[in-house]
Amino acid sequence: MSSVFEYAPAPESRSIVDIAPSYGLFIDGEFVEAADGKVFKTVSPSTEEVLSEIAQAGEADVDRAVQAARKAFEKWSALPGSERAKYLFRIARIIQERSRELAVLETLDNGKPIKETRDADLPLVAAHFFYYAGWADKLDHAGFGANPRPLGVAGQVIPWNFPLLMLAWKIAPALATGNTVVLKPAETTPLSALFFADICRQAGLPKGVVNILPGYGGAGAALVAHPDVNKVAFTGSTAVGKEIARTVAGTRKKVTLELGGKGANIVFDDAPVDQAVEGIVNGIFFNQGQVCCAGSRLLVQESIQDELLESLKRRLSTLRLGDPLDKNTDIGAINSEEQLTRITSLVDQGEAEGAERWSPACELPESGYWFAPTLFTNVTQAHTIARDEIFGPVLSVLTFRTPDEAVAKANNTPYGLSAGIWTEKGSRILAVANKLRAGVVWSNTFNKFDPTSPFGGYKESGFGREGGRHGLEAYLDV
Amino acid sequence: MPSSALTAAHPLKDVTASDSALRRFLHGLPGVDAVGLEGRAASLGTRSIKTTAKAYAIDLAISMVDLTTLEGADTPGKVRALGAKAVRPDPTDRTTPTTAAVCVYPDMVAVAKEAVAGSGVKVASVATAFPAGRAPLTVKLADVREAVTAGADEIDMVIDRGAFLAGRYLKVYDEIIAVKEACGTSARLKVIFETGELSTYDNIRRASWLGMLAGADFIKTSTGKVAVNATPANTLLMLEAVRDFRAQTGIQVGVKPAGGIRTSKDAIKFLVLVNETAGGDWLDNHWFRFGASSLLNDLLMQRQKLATGRYSGPDYVTVD
């Protein structure tokens, strides 16, 4: 957009966060080297700068960590709930106190805009710990019978799109219910989990209750397969989720999987257009579209297609892409070169299959991993970009004529994590929401999260729920 | 009978053919989701405006101020002082832009006109039985003609909220048309909706379109005389309306939030709304104004701070 009003750069200070040149694994309350001495580097996706060298967990380390967690479980699970709550409240408060530091750290390591880490990620991280701290001494009243027991050692594997938030979703309910934890963060975003390890020490959390093992898929597989792990929780791709399901099949391990998605955002002709446009933008461009519940399929009623697309394109032209540490940046960097390659190849396929590609005029920085916000029109259910999860800032636009057609198209996907409905007609919201096979259905909004609200999928989007009272069940023997 | 402001070639001329046609059109406009609208306004409020952008924004905001005194106790002396301030907002720094206009009651127009003569500062006057608008149309029109005859460059009229809320849209439309006629070719017309009394965002969008259809040169949030005046959300909504109206008709209409905008920080947030909603075409004082009296001094103090690096304090700007 040409404008006489150019915003000067407004970068958040990096000096608030002190990143050490190297980090160890966090096992039994100590930072230690990997048993085989292996390390890997973590880079900032927006600049490709190496941020730190991280110890890489192997099978031996997984075993050490699980043993530490097993030992800690005896005492931790025996604590009264009100005592566990004290630790969780303390962790929540430290997160709030250090939120600016953690926001900058997350932006450096992940590439997402500071606006999002500051205004979305960190407040939600603290809120999850506060929320589950509140449950710790009320488990008898959670509807699972009197005195529900914890499962034991939880092996948790989390993705790179919301590193600290996914950690909070996993660790807060696990600790509140009396389990101990071995968590493997993603190899591209290990830093905030290691800072969290430091927060656990700051909070005086007993040794071994939380163990953090940065590493690659091998470490995750070893953790999932470890015979002394009682509960597996995984968020990530559907392919890995299926692998995990195969590994734990026939064991006594409890599992929750939160996998991919291809969310439909349905806009009816009586929708509040300006707010729907905001919701579409938020649905697919939040966190560069690297969100499992992203509204990556826009289903728009044919009669308002032209009008809505015009508004949407105009709105996309005002998105600001660039330095994620700039407080005015809306779109940051793609998390890794590997992910950028995947997005690029799917988008190329979309073009090859005949869909019409559009992006606003947008200058991409020279270093780092970047992808301009992209819109595909003339997309049908038969296009690959309407079926495969792209996990990037790419929106596929499809049309429908009747509510039944909208529902049929929305449900015609192997996934079922999220959906959105935009209409001014309340009865239609209820009628359509009831027919959608999706774990979360937002109406006249999108990508809203809250610790009190359960989250999870249907079909290939996984099973089990995180968040809310339902999130407790996954960590209790009920 | 309405003497249509819309020419025969106007793409929307049919919608004002009858009361029912007008109602159908206004009620057919897309709805407004209050939560989403306020969320968007709040998120634009987090834009961080610094250094060169801030200096630019402050000067722009000063040049958009309608410096206003609308008190029963207004005297010619007070109005002359206001005019002098509009022409020379900061006597210690002559690079400070003049304000857009001074805004006074009709009986003060002549005094104001003389006070700003030759400066380029416009004189705006609130006519049509401001602020209640509860007077017969003949009285309102006489009010407008007096102001225009006395030299007013701009007329700020209030709509009949009672008629609007009763759904008598054509009555409101006809009144605006009549006032626009009374303005003649010399005065631009700002139509005030008193959004705080319209109570819903859907009503504000309808009023915006009604005003624009009737030929308003500006649409304005409020009189500054009720509890809820300009807010980021209602201004954002009106900016969407002028943007959409131009897209449909080719006619550009200005926006004026009024009342309650007191700090530079607030003013800059409104400029961000303009920039990212209607766009750069609205970023000058022909198309965007602030109706404010105390805002100017805060802008001046911020300007001095940028120039000198330190805060001066209220005694370093003039009281009026």
Image: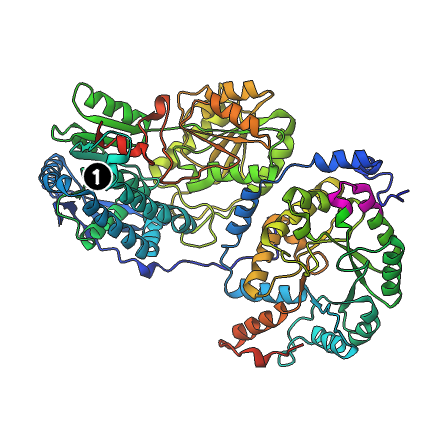
Eyeballing the image, is B75 above or below A155?
Answer: below
Eyeballing the image, is A232 above or below B317?
Answer: above
Residue A227 visible within the image: yes
Which is nearer the eye, A73 or A386? A73
Which is nearer the eye, A249 or B259? B259
Taking the magenta stretch, the answer to whether it contains residue B170 is yes
Colouring convention used in this rendered image of the protein = rainbow
| Residue at the spot 30% in from the left edge and 27% down from the top edge | A464
What secondary structure prevails in the magenta region?
helix
Residue type at tag 1: Leu
Chain containing mark 1: A
Tell me the quarter of the picture where residue A398 sits.
top right
Eyeballing the image, is A413 above or below B82?
Answer: above
Looking at the rendering, in which quadrant would you find the C terminus of chain A? Answer: top left
Point out residue A412 in the picture as x, y percentages from the top left corner: 46, 19
Which is nearer the eye, A202 or A474? A474
Q: Could you tell whether B179 is left or right of B271 in the image?
A: right
Magenta span of residues: B163-174
Residue B183 visible within the image: no
Which is nearer the eye, B285 or A347? B285
Q: How many residues crowd mark 1 within 10 Å: few (<14), some (14–19), many (20+)?
A: many
Point out residue A224 in the picture as x, y percentages from the top left corner: 19, 29
Tell me the quarter of the picture where residue A263 sits.
top left
Taking the magenta stretch, the answer to whether it contains residue B17 is no
Q: Secondary structure at mark 1?
A: strand
| Residue at the spot 40% in from the left edge and 36% down from the top edge | A291
Point out residue A320 in the picture as x, y percentages from the top left corner: 50, 48
Q: Which residue is mark 1?
A: A183
Point out residue A81 in the picture as x, y percentages from the top left corner: 20, 42
| Residue at the spot 57% in from the left edge and 78% down from the top edge | B314
| Residue at the spot 10% in from the left edge and 35% down from the top edge | A63
Q: Could you tell whether A241 is left or right of A56 in the image?
A: right
